[in-house]
Image (cartoon, rainbow, N blue to C red):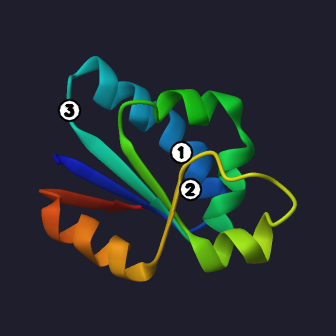
Amino acid sequence: MDVLFHVTTEGGATLLLPLARACQRGAHAFGAFFTHEGVRGLASPDLQAALRGARAVVCEESWHRYRADSPCPVELGSQTVNSSLMGHARRVVSL
């Protein structure tokens, strides 16, 4: 994976949308891990669409804390998955 976006804030999720689209245009393999308040950004249908074809994982504990009332649109995972993704990424961008 070329870039892993590590999304920890709701504002970071907003920034992810144009970055994900840029990765798609440039044919860069990317992924995203959402944790803490960053999981709120997954309420955006546009962001969900921009993540298609990428590995997108959300911290299960954060999802249940901030978005338990909604079905999760991406893979539920743990901080262990986050560590693995970071290990496979050439670059990590924290949002």
Q: Secondary structure at mark 3?
A: loop
Mark 3 neighbour density, 10 Å: few (under 14) some (14–19) many (20 or more): some
* Residue shown at 68% from the left, 68% from the top: 63
Residue 15's label in the rendered image is 1
CB atoms at circles 2 and 1 under 8 Å apart?
yes
| Disc 2: which residue | 12
- From the top left corner, tell me how far across and down residue 41 is, in percent: 67, 51
- 2 with respect to 23 (left or right): left
Instruction: For marks 3 and 1, give the one nearer the viewer.
Output: 3
- Considering only vertical position in the picture, is 83 above or below 40? below
Residue at the image point whose x is 56% and y is 56% from the top: 12
User: Looking at this rendering, what residue extends furthest in the right direction?
Assistant: 69
Image quadrant in which you'd find residue 26: top left
Q: CA distance from mark 2 to mark 3?
A: 20 Å
User: Of circles 2 and 3, which is in front?
Assistant: 3
* Residue highlighted by disc 3: 28
| Mark 1 Cα-neighbour bin, 10 Å: few <14, some 14–19, many ≥20 | some
Q: Can I make out residue 36 in this image?
A: no
